[in-house]
Image (cartoon, helix red, strand yellow):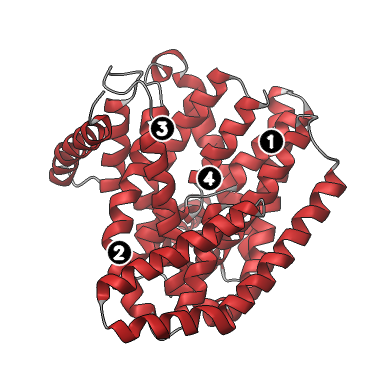
Amino acid sequence: MEHQVLINICAIFGVATLVIIICKMLKIRYIIGYLITGVFLSPHTSGLFSKMEEVEIYSEIGIILLLFTVGLEFSFSNLKRIKNYVLVGGAAQVFLTIFLTAALIWLLVRPSIEESVFWGFLYALSSTAIVVKVLQDRNMINTPHGKFILAVLLFQDIMIVPLMLFTPILAGVGDSPGTALLWLIGKMILMGGIAFLLAKYVIPFFLKTEMKVQSQEVFLIATVFIVTGIALLTEKLGLSLALGAFIAGLIIAETDYNRMAISCFLPFRYVFMSFFFISMGMLLDYKIFLTDFPWIAFWFVFSLSVKAIAGILAAKTMKIDWKTALAAGFSIAQIGEFSFVLAQSGLEYQLISMNNYQIFLAVSILLMSLTPFIVGNAEKIQPALVSFFGKKQKLQKKSSDE
C-alpha cells in the first residue's frame, strides 16, 4: 500500500499518545503504556498490522541509540573504575542465573538438558533499556547498587553474542563449542584492537576536523556516521550491532564533544525506544492469559525469585553489603530485551515451543511492567525486611515470655 510506513507510524504514535495519557492519569509508567500499545496493535488483537518488519527495524535502532548513549555517559575511564564489577560480578550473575534456571527447570519439568540450558540463557539477561532509564530518571546511576547494576548489564550485553553463537550448538547445528569459543575470542580481540585505534587516532581527528565547520547539524550527521559505521563493523565480525553502538559511545565519551553528543541524541533515543517496547507488545497473543494463566503466574514467581537470588549472590561475591546486594538483585530480576531476540532463535532451532514462547512473552512483559516500581524502591527492601523480622522476633519473644 502507498505510504504504508507513514500510516504505520501514524497509527503507532496515535494509539501510544492516547494510552500514555491514560497511564499518566493513573500514575502508571510510560514503558507499560508502550507495552499496552503494542498489545492493542498486535496482529493477534487487530488487523491493522499483518507484518511488523518496519517496527522491528525501528526498535533495533532504538536499542542501538540506547546503548550508544549509555556508552557516552559511561566512558572508558568509568569502565576502568568498575572493571571488577563487570568481570567478576557480571560473570557471577550470568552464570549463576544460567545454572540455577537450568537445574530447577530440569528438575521441575524434565525437558532435555539442551532445552534447560537454553532457558538459562533466556533468564540470564535483564532489561538494559528499562533499568538504565529508571536509574537515570531517579539519579541513581552513581549509587552503590546503581554502579553494580550497570556493570552487570554491560556484561550481559556482551554475553548476548556468545549466547547467540551457542544456541545452534545446543540444537546440534553448527561448529563444535571449542571452535565457536575460539572464533568468538578472536573476534573480540580484533574488535578491541580496532576500537583502540579508532579511539586513539581516528575519531578524535575526525571530530576535530568536522567541528571546524561549527555546525551542530554537521556534528549530528558525523556522529550518526560514526555510530552506524562501528555498529555495522561489529556485525560484520559476527558480533552484535548494539555492542558496536556501545563501543562507539565509549570512544566519543573520551573526546571533548561527549556532552554535545548526549544533547543531540537524547530526543532520538526516546522516540526509537518507544518502537522497541511497542514491538515487544505486538508479539504477544493476549489469549495466552486466558488459556495458560496458572502457568504464567507460576513462571512469573519462578523468574522473579531465581533472578533476584542469582543477582544477590553475585553481589555478595563482590563482598557488597546486604542492603546494596538486595537492591541490585531485585532491580535486575526481569527478562531482558535481548532475550526476545534469543527466544526467536530458540523457536527457529526448536528449543522452545510456540506455546512456551507466548508464556515467556507474557511473563517477560509482566516483569518489565513491575520493574520501574521495584527499581525505584529497591533501596527500601533491606530496611523493610529488617523491620519485618525484627517485629516478628519481638512477637515470638513476647509470646514465649507469656
Does residue 117 appear to the left or right of 398 in the view shown? right
Q: Is residue 336 visible?
A: no
Check if mark 4's residue and mark 1's residue have beta carbons within 8 Å.
no
User: In the image, which disc is placed on residue 22?
Assistant: none
Residue at image location 56% in from the left, 31% down from the top: 344
Label 1, label 2: how far apart the Cα atoms are:
35 Å
Label 4, label 3: how far apart the Cα atoms are:
17 Å
Q: Is residue 208 visible?
A: yes
Q: Earlier in the sequence, mark 2 or mark 3?
A: 3
Q: Position of residue 222 (x, y in %)?
A: 38, 70
| Disc 1: which residue | 118
| Disc 3: which residue | 53
User: In the image, which disc is placed on residue 266?
Assistant: 2
Select label 4 or label 3 by which is in front.
3
Residue at image location 85% in from the left, 48% down from the top: 179
Label 2, label 3: how far apart the Cα atoms are:
24 Å
Does residue 229 appear to the left or right of 119 in the view shown? left
Work out whether residue 296 or residue 62 is closer to the camera in this orientation and state it: 62
Residue at image location 77% in from the left, 25% down from the top: 112
Label 4, label 1: how far apart the Cα atoms are:
14 Å
Check if mark 4's residue and mark 3's residue have beta carbons within 8 Å.
no
Q: Earlier in the sequence, mark 1 or mark 2?
A: 1
| Disc 4: which residue | 338
Kind of residue at disc 3: Glu
Q: Position of residue 178 (x, y in %)?
A: 87, 48
Q: Position of residue 23 (x, y in %)?
A: 19, 41
